[in-house]
Image (spheres, helix red, strand yellow):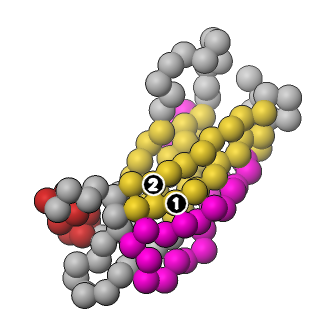
Amino acid sequence: VTLVLEPRSNLKSLDSQLSLSAVSQSDSASSTQSLTHGGVPELLVGLSYNATTGRMSVELIKGSHFRNLAINKPPDTYGRLTLLNSVGQEISRCKTSVRRGQPNPVYKETFVFQVALF
C-alpha cells in the first residue's frame, strides 16, 4: 500500500521540489478484508523540516489494524520510506526494523533526509 503525503495548506510560498512517499508493507487481500471489518490499516507519521540546515526528519511512530488473513497469525510488519523528487525519481530510501507478530506495531524510528534548501 503506497501513501503519498501532500501538504494540506500552502506553507508561506515554499514551492516544494520534493514529494515524500511512505510505504507500508502489507498484503492487499488483508487490507481489503480489513476494510470490511472496519479496521482500516493506519500509519502514524511525524514530519519536520529545518529550513536552516535543509534537513527533513520523518518519524514512523506506529501502525494499527495490520492483518494477515492468509495465515491465522499476526503479521510481521515494517515501514519503508522513499523520498522522491518532483518527477518521481527516487532520491533516498530507508526501512524500519521488522516487528514480528504485531498487528499494531510501535516503530518510533526517525529518519533524516538532507534535502535542497528552499
Residue under label 1:
62
Q: Quadrant of residue 116?
A: top right
State which region is magenta: 86-113
- Looking at the picture, tell me which residue is in the foreground, 33 or 26: 33
How far across and down, in percent of the image, does residue 115 sit?
73, 38
Relative to 94, residue 7 above or below: above
Indicate yes or no whether the magenta region holds residue 68. Answer: no
Instruction: Look at label 1 and name its amino acid.
Output: Lys
User: How many numbered marks have been drawn onto this rendered protein structure?
Assistant: 2
Quadrant in which the C terminus appears: top right
Point out the image quarter for the N terminus: bottom left
Task: Answer above or below: position of 38 versus 30.
Answer: above
Q: Position of residue 82 (x, y in %)?
A: 56, 53
Residue at 44% x, 77% y is 102
**Pointer 2 residue:** 43
The residue furthest right is 52
Task: Give, as a three-letter code, the residue at label 2.
Answer: Leu
Q: Residue at x 54, y 16 (%)?
A: 10
Are dots 1 and 2 in contact, CB under 8 Å?
yes
Instruction: Classify 10 Å Cα crowding around label 2: few (below 14), some (14-19), many (20 and above).
Output: some
- For residue 109, side relative to residue 42 (left or right): right
Left or right: residue 106 versus residue 66 is right
Q: Residues within 10 Å of mark 1 (few under 14, many from 20)?
A: some
Residue 109 sits in which quadrant? bottom right
SS class, disc 2: strand
Task: Inspect this view and state whether residue 15 appears.
Answer: yes
